[in-house]
Image (tube, rainbow, N blue to C red):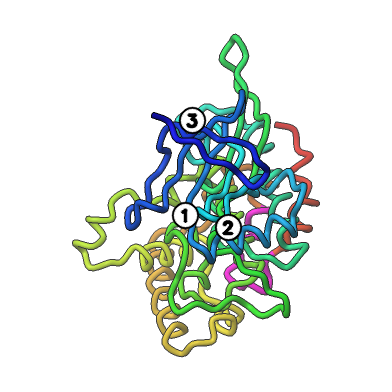
Amino acid sequence: MASTIVGASGRLYVQGEVLRRHREDDKLSVFKAESGNESFVFKRVSRPFYDLSRRLAAEFAGSRRLRMHIDCNQEEGILFYPYFRDTLLALIQGDPDFPLVERKKILRRVGEAIQELHGKDWIHIDVKPDNVLVNWICDKNGNKTVADVALGDFDIAFKSESGEPCQTPYAIGNVMWQSPEGQTGRGMTKASDMFLFGLMCIYVLGGGEFLLLNDYQELVKNGISPEQEILIRHFSYFGPVTEGLLQQVNSEDWCNALKGVSQIAEEAVKEQPELRFEWWGKELGPEAQNMISGMTNMDPMARTTIEQVLAHPWWQEAT
């Protein structure tokens, strides 16, 4: 028998299918729910995340680009969200021929979401394709058109009210979608989000094979951690370690580690110059390559801001 949950607004939600169950705690689960003719997602969350979400929803009330909860149940620690039919990751994986003009529309809206966050000194820290929610419609000929896009999952979002970078005891987020400073857990700023947005642009525009790790077990067998492999790739693609990055991280141990990984990458580039983004990024087009190069600068202080990215000529380029 389906269970009914009441939100703070008094609206009734009838629980449907389980969308995702937390591996460590069955109480933290994601479900699909129905209320009238509308579909929603409800998520049981920890008290700290519940409080963080309430703060974010109040600060970004009415946002169309950020996926904030629209109702809650304080007693059970439940947040209710609009239902989206796909994540960006699932959409691209499931439809490799998804039109470029629609991909570009999604990226633009993600950029606008980041602009909203950065405008109020919030850092998302976990910008990646599976945290982008997409609704699309399909005509009788099977052509898909994007209807709505929102950036979600603010579990590790951080507000830098004094402009100080985010520091954590260890790296957080997904290893494949992390800035070089984010891999260390030190010195994360708005520029870290920009690096991740650059990676997302590469992925959405067709460069996913350069970014994704497909065989973790093989790496482990060879004594290489996923974090090390990703850092080697990023230094190979986007250039050697910079003084600005070392200053941002500000840890002797981590600086030595980054220098060592960067040296490995430089040796690889000597043998294969085509590893550099300046080579293989040409396939994305000159304007896209130029825009992404600014976001993926290995010096956080030299990365382009979201305002500069959204003003880039690539958005007006015909597709």
Q: Which residue shows up at 56% across the image and 59% down it?
A: 50
- Note whether 170 is above or below 213 in the view shown: below
Q: Nearer the viewer, mark 2 or mark 3?
A: 2
Give percent across and percent down for residue 68.
65, 49
The mark that comes first in sequence, 2 or 3, is 3
Left or right of 117? Residue 87 is left
Residue 51 x %, y %: 60, 63
C-alpha distance separating marks 1 and 2: 36 Å
The residue shown at (68%, 43%) is 9
Front residue of this view, candidates 195 and 312? 195
Main SS, magenta region, reads helix
Badge 1 vs badge 2, beta-carbon distance below 8 Å: no
User: Who is closer to the viewer here, 202 or 175?
Assistant: 175
Instruction: Assess disc 2: are there few (<14), some (14-19) or many (≥20) residues with their C-alpha within 10 Å of its C-alpha.
Output: many
Say which mark, if any, is on residue 274.
Answer: 1
Circle number at residue 292: none
Q: Is residue 191 above or below residue 11?
A: below
The stretch of residues the image draws in magenta is: 290-303
296 falls in the magenta region: yes
The residue that appears at 21% across and 64% down in the rendered structure is 222
Q: Which residue position holds label 3? A: 96
SS at mark 3 in the image? loop
- Name the residue carrying label 2: 154
Q: Which quadrant holds residue 156? A: bottom right
16 magenta-colored = no
Q: Residues under labels 3 and 1: Cα distance? A: 25 Å
Figure check: 193 above or below 81 = below
